[in-house]
Image (cartoon, helix red, strand yellow):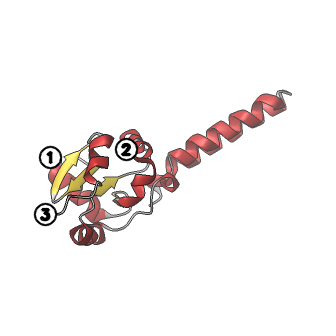
Amino acid sequence: MMRAWILPVLLVVCGSLLAAALAARGVSAAAVPLLLLFVLVAGVHSPLAFPRSIGAAEAQRRSALDGRPVVYWRAGCPFCLRLRTRLGRDAGRLHWVDIWRDPAGAAAVRSVNDGNETVPTVVVAGRPHTNPDPAWVREQLAPRPRR
């Protein structure tokens, strides 16, 4: 669980040190925006930028009931961040599993990616798709026509 916070904490610490150095040199006007930039980037790369994660077993159970895709992800992954930001509000309609918090989720990802923890891995109707296009993922959320 701590791995997910290493990058965000490191960004805030580095930003604070740089801002303090600038402030010590008398360049306070540049220190505040720099610190805010580092905090913003840390927030985007933190688990807080993603919908609440659930365990792999629960995500699979929910997906079987409602048909919505399961997204396996991890904090700090630029491809996961790209998927999350491009989905916008639709991201909340997916079931998210943080593979760094859930060993079963990590095992599920390794089982479909030749032993690698390649994320994002999106499972739709039981079929895994590694790093799919966000537009395609959004299409999978569209309601199916009734027959």
User: Up-down: is 145 above or below 25?
Assistant: below
Q: Quadrant of residue 80?
A: top left
Q: Position of residue 3 (x, y in %)?
A: 45, 54
Residue 86 is marked as none
The answer to whether marks 3 and 2 mark residues whose Cβ atoms lie closer than 8 Å is no
Q: Amino acid at mark 1?
A: Asp
For marks 3 and 1, the one nearer the N-term is 1
Q: Which residue is mark 1?
A: 114
The answer to whether marks 3 and 1 mark residues whose Cβ atoms lie closer than 8 Å is no
Q: Nearer the viewer, mark 3 or mark 2?
A: 3
Q: Which residue is mark 2?
A: 83
The answer to whether marks 1 and 2 mark residues whose Cβ atoms lie closer than 8 Å is no
Determine whether the residue tagged by mark 3 lies in a helix, strand or loop. Answer: loop
Residue shown at 70%/41% (left/top)?
16
Which residue sits furthest front? 147
Q: Which residue is mark 3?
A: 147
For marks 1 and 2, the one nearer the N-term is 2
Does residue 26 appear to the left or right of 43 in the view shown? right
Front-lying residue, 27 or 81: 81
For marks 3 and 2, the one nearer the N-term is 2
Residue shown at 50%/52% (left/top)?
49
Q: Amino acid at mark 3?
A: Arg
Residue shown at 40%/54% (left/top)?
91
Where's the N terminus, which quadrant? bottom left
Query: How far apart are the two marked residues, 3 and 2, measured between alpha carbons?
Result: 31 Å
Is residue 25 visible from the viewing direction of this image?
A: yes
